[in-house]
Image: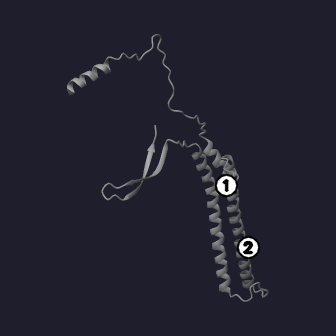
Amino acid sequence: MKNSFLITLLLVLFSVSLFGQQNGELKIKSQDSIATKKLHIDPLSPAKAAFYSAVLPGLGQAFNKQYWKIPVIYAGLGAGITIYSWQNTQYNRYRDAYKRRILGFTDDEFPTLTDATIIDAQRYHKKNRDLTLLVTALFYILNIVEANVSAHLAQFNVSEDLTFNPSFYQDEFSYKPKVGLTLNYKF
């Protein structure tokens, strides 16, 4: 009974005439399945941004169209220059007072301080002045490096086909929920 039913089913299925092609000329249409955007990549763009930032801080960020970074750069450089100037003024005050004491003048700006205290104050302000100069120079260099890196990253191709998502699954042995990360790449 099973065999006769199976044979009847096969005969019915294969007795139907199917035509998968049309008569006449065969036309093939090709369509690109991968849509790509043409990016204009200027290989000198990072070098230009770094050069502009070296000439005038913030100009490289303007070249990269990241205008919000310009006030941050000028605030950092302005704070560094202001602190340097104040520390230098304080250092010169203590140095001049010590020089006047050595020469024997009695009209001192700091009459209650000893010579050792004035020397310590000179060293303190000189150390802070030099440290401020170093931090300000590093901030200036960071401005140049940031403009260069931002210009490089602007040319980086970020595709929606690459995703990094959290995943939640249940452990097969303990039936406890687990958390993981999955990296998906779609073609």
> Extreme front residue here?
1
Q: Position of residue 163 (x, y in %)?
A: 48, 46
Number of numbered discs on residues: 2
Q: Amino acid at mark 2?
A: Thr
Q: Amino acid at mark 1?
A: Lys
- The image's mark for residue 69 is 1
Mark 2: secondary structure: helix
| Left or right, 19 with reference to 115 | left
> Extreme bottom residue here?
112
Q: CA distance from mark 1 to mark 2?
A: 30 Å
Q: Position of residue 58 (x, y in %)?
A: 69, 53
- The image's mark for residue 1 is none
Quarter of the image where one finds residue 78: bottom right
> Extreme right residue here?
107
Residue designated by label 2: 89
Mark 1: secondary structure: helix
| Residue positioned 70% across, 65% down in the render | 79
| Residue positioned 21% across, 23% down in the render | 4
Report crowding for label 1: few under 14, some 14 to 19, many 20 or more residues within 10 A (C-alpha).
some
Mark in the foreground, 1 or 2:
1
Image quadrant holding the N terminus, namely: top left
